[in-house]
Image (tube, rainbow, N blue to C red):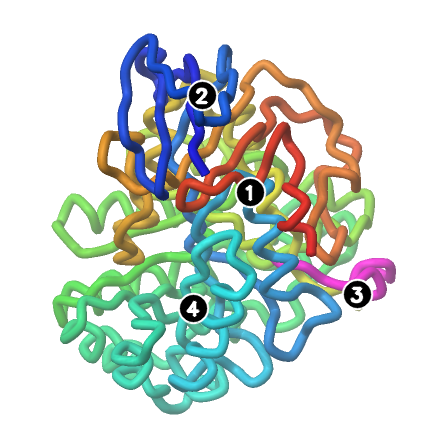
Amino acid sequence: MKYLISGAQIGAGERTDILIADGIIQEMGSGLSSPDATRVDADGLIALPGLVDLHTHLRQPGYEDSETVLSGSQAAARGGYTCVHAMANTFPVADTAGVVDEVLHLGRRAGLVEVRPVGAVTVGLAGERLAELGAMATSEAAVRVFSDDGKCVHDPLIMRRALEYVRSFDGVIAQHAQEPRLTEGAQANEGEVASELGLTGWPSVAEEAIIARDVLLAQHVGGRVHICHLSTAGAVDIVRWAKKRGIAVTAEATPHHLYFTDERVRSYDAQFKVNPPLRTQEDVEAVRLGVADGTIDIIATDHAPHPAEAKDCEWSAAAFGMLGLESALSVVQETLVETGMLDWDDVARVMSTAPARIGRVTGQGILPAVGAPAHITLLDPAARVPFTTDRISSKSTNSPYLGETLPGQVRWTFFGGRATVIDGELVEEARA
């Protein structure tokens, strides 16, 4: 299929035409024509490289009542993504070459985005002994990102050995920074709101202590460490300090930690129950600044689908996590672009180029250029669309943005030159 995208603005740059054929950007310039190409009127639209998510929970195998690789791929495509990293906390856990290869093949079968499996750091996420890191790295899935996300690699010796091991194939350990002893029974950010509501507090230091330990371990062994869903002002300061010392640390922030504060917990609406918890306004402002000044490298969704019964219950019994793929770009537009903290080139960097680099994914995260793979997202930044269940393609609906009116809408997503989203809707074959 050939497409001629007419008049798209490339990031924060100039408007241009883009001719796509055979999965590749064949030509760019003004006044292009191609009689056999489908014309896409991109006047007023921003062309971004297909988004890359380093932190997605697709739940399959084992938790298909929440999400499948297919339904998660549908959600990703609709959100403008062309590559997602599927986290390892499945059943069975993705701690062997066999499981990561299964996830890889499920992604290829869905065919809507590139699905990159994340391997577990420890066997069964138990934190007691290293998983088959080398076997997963040399498998067909060629895993480069390893994480026990959902649980912290709390043993410093295990963490050290993991950082040492992955150096041989340029891998990275993505740490869920949560000191387990400091967060036993924790339900909300430790502070005024939790105290008033009688909820067990989740202190910032539980996150910050692990980050401080791990950046020092990474420095000691010369390994790469990535901090998942950073959420506190102190954590931003530690990562900033580590980068100034030349330590190989990268970090991510989620859209919800840029958007919401722990004041939302007052509603007892379990859609706002997430790990790490929503923090204070001071933390939100520090995290936004961390993204703007480059301390925080990327935006990652931590897309965490759950069935209705896991959220439609009392707060203490509810599952942690919220959806993110379909709303992420809109939230970034509102919190960072419309506040003047980022421009669209910066958005391309934090939501595509940098996550592809950290995950060592080739062919993704490339700004539209002649000869590049045609992974492209066309965003209408002027749209103002209520976020309703109609905008959710995930198998679950646990989004904290329901009822919000968010800016921007993905109009088209191209994966390998094939349109998976047209005018904001999945193409018919993508809904199968």
Q: Which mark is residue 266?
A: none
Confirm whether the magenta stretch covers residue 313: yes
Q: Which mark is residue 310?
A: 3
Instruction: Please state which of residues 379 and 120 is positioned toward the viewer in this rendering.
Output: 379
Give the number of the mark in front: 2 or 1: 1
**Residue at the image point whose x is 54% and y is 18% from the top:** 381
Instruction: Please state which of residues 85 and 73 is positioned toward the viewer in this rendering.
Output: 73
Residue 31: give x, y in percent of width and height: 34, 8
**In the figure, is residue 98 to the left or right of 249?**
right
As drawn, the residue found furthest toward the bottom would be 129
Mark 3 neighbour class, 10 Å CA radius: few under 14, some 14 to 19, many 20 or more? some
Q: Earlier in the sequence, mark 4 or mark 3?
A: 4
Q: Secondary structure at mark 4?
A: strand
**Residue at the image point whose x is 22% and y is 69% from the top:** 217
Of the 4 image quadrants, the one containing the C terminus is bottom right
Q: How many marks?
A: 4
Q: Earlier in the sequence, mark 4 or mark 1?
A: 4
Q: Earlier in the sequence, mark 1 or mark 3?
A: 3
Q: Which mark is residue 46?
A: 2
Q: Which residue is mark 1?
A: 420
Q: Secondary structure at mark 2?
A: strand
- Range drawn in magenta: 304-315
Kind of residue at badge 2:
Ile
